[in-house]
Image (cartoon, rainbow, N blue to C red):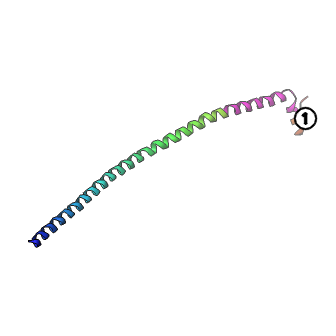
Amino acid sequence: MNDITIATSSAASHSLTSGRRLGRVRCAARAAGRDLVYLTAVLGSSIAGYPAGAVGVSLTLSLCLLVFGVLVWVPVAMAAAAWQASIAASSAGTGTVRSSLAIAGRRPPA
């Protein structure tokens, strides 16, 4: 009877061990499935999020360049206009046209 008891307990322990292995495999398969779903969702959101981020960065930079560019361009344009006006005012009525014609070898009209 000892032999039968040993054989029975050995078979029971074998089925218990294979049941534990099957449970571990199922647990690992579930975890792998969850991870796959999570990674797929993250991949999809990163694909959708990249263009939105790129558009946001490009709009921000272009608006910064536009605003700060205008803030720099307007004073420079005003200074250039004032400089040109001062040159025109200083040369007005001084005969610079006559002197340049004389340099060219032509006689200015009297």
Instruction: Say which residue appears at 31% left-offset and 55% top-offset.
Output: 32
Residue 33 located left or right of residue 72? left
Instruction: Kindly indicate the quadrant of the structure image that contains residue 96.
Output: top right
SS majority, magenta: helix
Instruction: Kindly indicate the quadrant of the structure image that contains residue 62.
Output: top right
Image quadrant for the C terminus? top right
Which residue occupies the foreground of this view, 1 or 101?
1
| Relative image position of residue 26 (x, y in whole percent) | 25, 57
Q: Amino acid at mark 1?
A: Arg
Residue 29 located left or right of residue 80? left
The magenta segment is 73-98
Q: Which residue is mark 1?
A: 107
In the displayed structure, would residue 88 be above or below residue 1?
above
Label 1 neighbour load within 10 Å: few <14, some 14-19, many 20+:
few
Furthest residue in direction bottom, as rendered? 3
Which residue occupies the foreground of this view, 61 or 30?
30
Callout count: 1
| Relative image position of residue 92 (x, y in whole percent) | 83, 27
Label 1's element?
loop
Residue 57 belongs to the span the image colors magenta: no
Instruction: Kindly indicate the quadrant of the structure image that contains residue 73.
Output: top right
Which residue occupies the foreground of this view, 83 or 99?
83
Instruction: Say which residue appears at 29% left-offset and 57% top-offset.
Output: 28
Instruction: Say which residue appears at 38% left-offset and 48% top-offset.
Output: 42
Residue 68 located left or right of residue 83? left
| Relative image position of residue 48 (x, y in whole percent) | 41, 45
Residue 87 belongs to the span the image colors magenta: yes
Furthest residue in direction left, as rendered? 1
Image quadrant for the N terminus? bottom left
Which residue occupies the foreground of this view, 59 or 45?
45
| Relative image position of residue 35 (x, y in whole percent) | 34, 52
